[in-house]
Image (tube, helix red, strand yellow):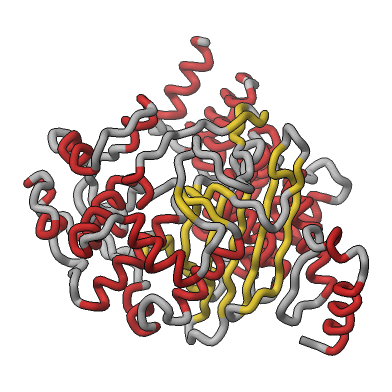
Amino acid sequence: MTIKCLVLLLLLLLSPFHSLLANSLPITTYSINPETVKQLNLQLKINSERYGIVGQAVRILKNNEVIYDGRDGFANVELSVPVNNKHRFPSYSVTKLFTSVLLMQLVERGDVDIHQSIRHYLPYLPEHWQNITIEHSLSHTSGIPRYFDQVIKTNQFLPTKKAVFISLSEQPEHFKIGSQNSYNNTNFLILSAILERKTGKTYSELVQSIIIEPLNLVNTGHASAKAVIKNMVSSYASTNGKLIKNRVFDWAEYSFAHSALYSTPADLSTFMSALVTGKFVKKSTLRKLWQPMQLNNGQDGRYAFGFEYKIKDGYQQVGHDGGNRVKLRHYVNSNQTDSYTITYMSNGNSHGVWTDILADSLMAIIDKNQFILADLSEQFISLVLQATIKNNDKKLQLFYIELSKALNHDATALERFLVDYAYGVRFGAGIQASLPAFEFYTKKFPKSANAWEYLAETWQIIGNKEKARQYYQKVLDIDPKSVNAKNQIEKLIRD
């Protein structure tokens, strides 16, 4: 820490207003440009206004040292309670990382073989699951039925894990083993059952004794959504752009392996730092296990030992999302010399913004020269949402030049980027707001049937049948065999 930072910190601590400011100012324990902090704080407010985020709390680490800790918005809208550093957020499926780490320890000790059949450890599982391995469950490539679909329909859990597995025994698999990634909570229910069988302890006991207590994660735990938890934020969902109270599940304890976690940015970043610094397994073990499982077609899947995985902006990015409201990500470069960790937590938004977009909006500020695609995605979204501003078309053209350079003028990658972030705007800010993004896509790829089909679909959802028919016809002009375009034109005429 610089002398200037120390002086500022001492002045703050001696100030009579320190206690009032403690919950509103970012906490910095690592050198960071004050202007960068201001930009990060502003971006939180921009994200709140742009996507209708209720409340949010963020912690960012560089090489496992805190460089930013910020908050914005409300823990409870009805009572206008601002988010503070004591508030706990529902973290949902981030708990899957706890399950993965517990399993990592057994693998490192040689007690579990990830290439072994899940029936080797749980013989009572259906015989036709014999070819499913632990690795298939970790990477969501097992193809087994999704038990949680029925829970959502009935709002009821069966009494035990074993009862769940038996209930699925007669249901058909969803796809061929290893052929695709398909997110499925049943996989982690199986993994937790294996953990309990091998250790003789319950999943909750394992989490408490191996993760929570040693790391002193005093604001982390599992609970039914109906439970009363001190300092828990209220959770919200959206319907047609309007906030409503989130649906409450009376989580069964056995579901804790895949959901029902609550935590704070401080606790989750502490957990991730402990993992990457060798507190749970050796660093060499972690590097070995943090490799994406290959699908049957030879392509890399989206998961590495249960962690969501991708390579972007020169970093291996691993972690997990929770309920599309929480993101925990660790970024590490190829030679393991530089890393970042971001924990971005929110309690709901007006549409359904992707957490990738939220994280990228901050990482682009941290270092836009390193996080080039993150910066470009934020640029694109900002320009699209300012479509009516003067000279915006020129700015979009300049943006596209930079994007083309960043993607080495790869037409497939360029088209994929425009599709992804046009939908990112749609799910983040609403269908009407995404219209300029899809229109820009057709300008850049006028011979792409997909581009015109996405634009037609957008107008169709908005309710403009004439424009929808016009653009579906453009699809047929390019691809006369398009069944969907023909069907949609017929539907639009019929309706």
**Residue found 60% across the figure and 39% down from its top:** 235
Quadrant in which the N terminus appears: bottom right
Q: In this orientation, which residue lies closer to the viewer: 370 or 184? A: 184
Identify the residue shown where x is 35% and y is 25%.
Answer: 154
Horizontal arrangement in the rendering, residue 102 relative to residue 5 (left or right): left
Seen in the picture, residue 275 relative to 134 is either above or below; the reply is: below
Q: Position of residue 356 (x, y in %)?
A: 57, 56
> In the image as oriented, which residue stretches furthest toward the bottom?
3
Residue 248 coordinates in the image, percent (x, y): 50, 32
Does the image show residue 459? no
Q: Is residue 228 above or below residue 407?
A: above
> Picture quarter containing residue 452?
top right
In the rendered image, residue 163, in percent from the top left (x then y), is placed at: 19, 37
The reply to whether residue 194 is in sight is: yes
**Relative horizontal placement of residue 285, taking residue 436 as reference (left or right):** left
Image vertical order of residue 78 relative to residue 210, above or below? above
Q: Nearer the viewer, residue 332 or 175?
A: 332
Is 147 above or below relative to 371? above
Please give the count of numbered marks on the rendered protein. 0
Residue 165 at x, y = what percent?
19, 41
- Taking the spot 52% from the left edge, 51% from the top edge, the residue there is 262
